[in-house]
Amino acid sequence: ILWADPTSYLVNSYSDVKEINEKQKESFEATWLDTVMETRPDQKTSLFENDSLKRETHEQKKWAHFVVRRNPDQSIRVGRLGGTMQKYQLPYKSILPLPIFVPTHVIPQRELKGSLELENETKFDRVSQSGICSMKREVSEITKDMPPIIRPTRQDFRASRA
């Protein structure tokens, strides 16, 4: 049976660690988040006293906070605050120190270029020096394939507000 209390709450708390070593020009920063998922009275730890002569009652309950804690080492701990917590390891974002898609054989750029690429590059250099483009076309020739532009009949057209 889960006990629901109107005073249950959801709390996020975080912790920061920052270290700076100015001598070796190194720094380290870490942040981790604790999320209290549920708060409820701890079972079998309630104390209830009733003094009928003095007409006094006393009730005391211990509360249990169930927490999800995310650590900087890509692990999650789930459990009761102050008790044992179950650790779950998350998949690492970057496991390998090198990128995955690294070519096995690196070829210098000059050897990589083919004769067609070199020809196009020299042609571009010649055109850029003379300032005349060999594929120049008239504006009417470019716009003939475009759909016609329909202009609005009124210039002060406004959309209606619904």
Image (spheres, helix red, strand yellow):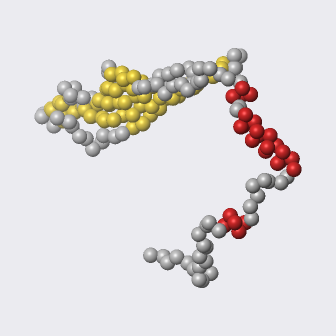
Res. 20 in view: no
Comparing 154 with 30, the one in front is: 154
Q: Position of residue 162 (x, y in %)?
A: 44, 75
Q: Residue at x 44, y 34 (%)?
A: 13
Residue that protrudes farthest toward the left in the picture: 52
Q: Residue at x 60, y 73 (%)?
A: 148
Please identify the quarter of the rendering in which residue 50 is found: top left
Q: Position of residue 63 (x, y in %)?
A: 29, 31
Question: Is 135 drawn above or below residue 3 in the view shown?
Answer: below
The quarter of the image holding the N terminus is top left
Question: Is 86 drawn above or below residue 142 in the view shown?
Answer: above
Res. 29 in view: yes
Residue that protrudes farthest toward the right in the picture: 130
Q: Residue at x 84, y 45 (%)?
A: 126
Comparing 79 with 90, the one in front is: 90
Please identify the quarter of the rendering in which residue 46 is found: top left
Residue that protrudes farthest toward the top in the picture: 24
Question: Is 36 drawn above or below residue 140 in the view shown?
Answer: above
Comparing 90 with 123, the one in front is: 123
Q: Position of residue 23 (x, y in %)?
A: 71, 16
Q: With 150 as the anchor, is 56 left or right in this view?
A: left
Q: Position of residue 44 (x, y in %)?
A: 19, 26
Q: With 2 as the anchor, is 107 left or right in this view?
A: right
Q: With 56 as the anchor, is 65 left or right in this view?
A: right
Please identify the quarter of the rendering in which residue 81 is found: top left
